[in-house]
Amino acid sequence: MRRTNPFFITEIIDSGKRSSLGWVEDSYSPGLSDFSLAGVGQGFLGLPLANGKLRLFLAFIFLALALIAGRSFYLQSIKGEYYFSLAENNRIRINYSRAQRGIIYDRNGKPLVKNISGFSLLITPVGLPEDSQAQQAVLARVAGVAGIDQKEIEEKISDKRYFFQPIIIKTGIDYEQAMLLKVLSADLPGVTLEVDAWRSYIDGQSFSHLLGYVGKISPEEYEEKSAAYLLSDNIGKIGLEKYYEDYLRGHHGEKKVEVDALGQEKKILSYFSPLAGSDIVLAVDADLQNRIYEILEERLGQTKAASVIVSDPTNGEILALVDYPSYDNNLFSLGISQVDYQKLLDDERKPLFSRSIAGEYPSGSTIKLVLATAGLEEGVIDRQTSFNSVGGLWIGKWFFPDWRAGGHGSTNVVKAIADSVNTFFYYLGGGYGDFQGLGVERIVKYLDMFGLGNTTGIDLPNEKPGLVPTPEWKQALKDEIWYIGDTYHLAIGQGDLLVTPLQVNNYTVAIANGGKLYRPHLAREIIQADGVRQAVMPEVILDNFVQPENLQIVREGMRQTVTAGSARSLMALPVEVAGKTGTAQWNNNKENHAWFTGFAPYEQPTFVITILVEEGGEGSSIAVPIASEIIRYWFTKN
């Protein structure tokens, strides 16, 4: 059988000649072994390519093959694990059972927090319909029922890194709304309603700075801790809730299931139960903490701010740590409103500020306890060393005054502490005339030994170190040399020296107990979910760095402060108290800060108290009366 078939030939080359042709006919039959064209004779049919074009064509082919091979390598080798994970996650679902967060108790077993159950709305992006219109319809329906802006929902689920994670859309959903969403969620793929839990803080504002609060994990926190957390988890944000997060949080239960193409559960692959978080027992006495806050409210009202710290000098335990004013940490449990948050920010007394551990203040005369110890230890003075206080010292044209016009007369170290005689400490710190004082280097050495210029290591986040100025620091920061006046100011707790109330309390502990500087701690015991108890042991930072007899002289000065000095009102208490007042200048246009630090009973101390009242004026007029009420309460109660 023969047939003809037209085809188009653009060029035919025969015997080195090129001619253009139109349509011609080809006659062939199956098995045709030769090929001829009428009028052309013997020749060949093809597309001629010059050598350059041929090389270009081959290069294109090789480049295409290389791109295909490279892409294949990228998908299989470099991104192979990712796509395998993607496929597995489409096949496998993990359902979590939330762990119960541990409870925090005071030293007497009184709970300070509790867990409240409620409902949260979540969306898992991978579970939403693939069709864009269907997905929008689901989101619109959720937004309508939950009372949320749809754009807000879309924003929350837009991060593709969390494609397989349940993302929390709304917390604190009331019961009626929760029931409606539960019914609707059966027809809303990817939407789930879960029982959630929040913290309820029992003792109100007195514990807010100490306990802190929990809140929903932020994207930044999740990136840091993603191996152990879900995007819908609560996490400690500040305070003890943050510091002991790893103990309190527990571990979620997990059920890994295989699902079919419709997302229906087919088989359980693995399961383990949730493990509740550990409970924390504090050294803090809740009744004392609350009473201190009440006393501050009664005495300071709405105009002042203060810090009060009470500790046990035998082991470094914190019995109370109160910042005033405070805030209601329950506001943060479900997410504080912008209005409420702005109100806290606008309050001039800074209720969110933890003065006890982060407030850095001039120490005023409370630092004289450390200077007296240093002078005795270094042999610069002894118990009998006396200087004549006539109202102050002149260095050239500069005058360094005593607080009492005309001075205090002949003064030894005990009287200098009791009456807070500046002249004595000018001599002791920087020297005068023929007398050689400690000098800045030795002063700095003892300030460092007593923990100043460093954090104490208390079990709270965001503690500040304060500042111990040195000649090197001043030269670097201010481009100025160190003058004798700088040493005089340092010796009485003025100038650039900055301390936190906790640091003052901690060095008072070391003086009270005979020379042990502890790391202060709030936690007393950790109780694991299985009931195993782990005691938090006292930790000594420095011991035997001062001779006991020298500290006894300093304690005598503190006792004389109460019997004959600036804290005589404490004589009316049912227990013998020793202490030191302080008045710290910090701003020429504002009131001085008021200090008191002391301990009781005098012979065998079990109670160290430090009080700072911002812009309170004289320590003797405001800090001492507050101390008196607190000490009376504690020793009457106990």
Image (tube, rainbow, N blue to C red):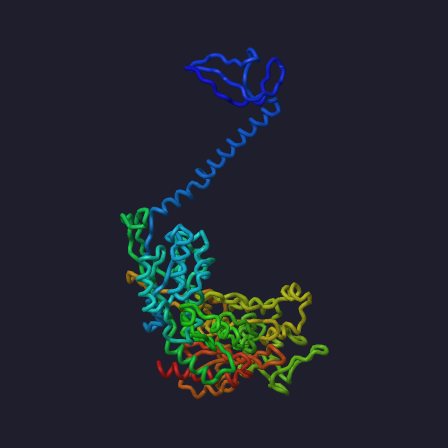
The residue shown at (60%, 21%) is: 20
Residue at image location 46% in from the left, 61% down from the top: 151
Q: Compare residues 317 and 591 and report the one nearer the observer.
A: 591
From the viewer's perspective, is 38 left or right of 289? right
| Residue sticking out furthest to the right | 397
Question: Residue 298, percent across and down?
Answer: 45, 85
Residue 557 in percent (x, y) is at 51, 80
Q: Percent position (x, y) of residue 478? A: 67, 66
Which quadrant of the figure has residue 292? bottom left
Visible residue check, residue 375: yes
Quarter of the image for residue 364 reads bottom right
User: In the displayed structure, does residue 531 sit left or right of residue 404?
Assistant: left
In the rendered image, is residue 547 in sight?
A: no
Describe residue 617's horizontal placement relative to residue 294 as left or right: right
Q: Quadrant of the N terminus?
A: top left
| Numbered disc total | 0
